Amino acid sequence: MRKSGRPWYSVVIAGGDPDENGESKKRFHILYRGSSQLVRTLDLDTLGQALFAELESLSFQERDDAIYVEAAPLAMDGKVALIPGSFLPSLWRLSRRLHQAGVRLPLARTVAVELETGKLIPTTPQLEIPHDAIQHLNEAVGKEAQAVLGIAGKSRSGHDHMQRWALTAPTTPVSILTTGAEEGPRQPQSRGQAVYRLAGMTLNLAKVGVAALEGLSVMASQAECYKFYGVTGTPAHRSRLIDDIASSLRD
């Protein structure tokens, strides 16, 4: 789907013609934004909820009820850290290793920040989606997809790393990570630098104006602020990113 030059979203459901070994060529449900893979999962509920979150985000530029930032909230033991939402597709591909490190990934690559308190808050939905939309998705393709994936009637305990979480209550992030560091481990940055970089990721900055900067400043004043290298092209870079994220949630 596309509107006013915005990118297409498309969904691929596991299945399709088998390969030479008799196995399906599509082993995961995948959500795309344009040509970029956003979500790769075994779970239809997760796929549907991620799509709804993406569609909801299309309204953020015109909203003034909160500060909407393209930042993904990562969780560990009740703590939350923010990382640029553009990195979430890469983190999905590292989900097993992040899960082993105790890090939980979110459904959405955006977050709402309360204007007055700077706290992360659940997004108030404006998109009207039937309450049984996920149920209909499962009824339409669920049994066939589970059979293709080989998980019908089986435990999914080996796929816990693919479970996603969503914010349900106001939360103060303990750490804010943005790009801008030289190669190597994460580096501390000033709260002013963090706010500057967060402003560049704020979807409704033009709509909210100075109040958005004030809310981001309040949030940054309550968090540890870091910058990281932001390259994931090699195994060493990916390991460093995982270490930076886990350390930011443990400190």
Image: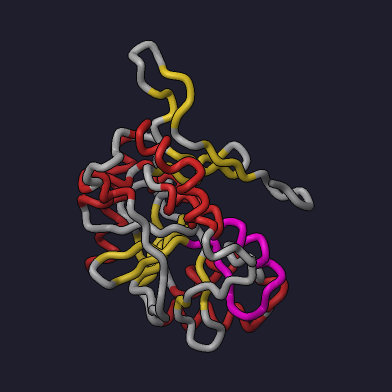
In-image side of 98 versus 35 (left or right):
left
Q: Going by the picture, which residue comes out furthest to the top?
A: 20
- Identify which residue, 229 or 212, lies in the foreground: 212
| Residue at 46%, 55% in the rendered image | 179
The picture places residue 49, in percent across and down from the top left corner, at 49, 57
**Location of the C terminus (image quadrant):** bottom left
Is residue 85 in view from this perspective? no
The structure's colour scheme is secondary structure
Instruction: Confirm whether the magenta stretch covers residue 87.
Output: no
**Is 251 placed above or below 183 here?**
below
Which residues are the magenta region?
53-71
Instruction: Confirm whether the magenta stretch covers residue 68.
Output: yes
Is residue 98 in view from this perspective? yes
- Identify which residue, 129 or 144, lies in the foreground: 144
In-image side of 77 versus 146 (left or right):
left
| Residue at 33%, 53% in the rendered image | 163
| Residue at 51%, 43% in the rendered image | 140
Q: Quadrant of residue 227?
A: bottom left
- Identify which residue, 53 or 99, lies in the foreground: 53
The picture places residue 91, in percent across and down from the top left corner, at 38, 48
- Identify which residue, 13 or 88, lies in the foreground: 13
Q: Going by the picture, which residue comes out furthest to the bottom?
A: 116
The picture places residue 233, in percent across and down from the top left corner, at 40, 36
**Is 232 placed above or below 210 here?**
above
| Residue at 28%, 49% in the rendered image | 161
The picture places residue 129, in percent across and down from the top left corner, at 60, 63
Tally the numbered discs.
Answer: 0
Q: Quadrant of residue 27?
A: top left
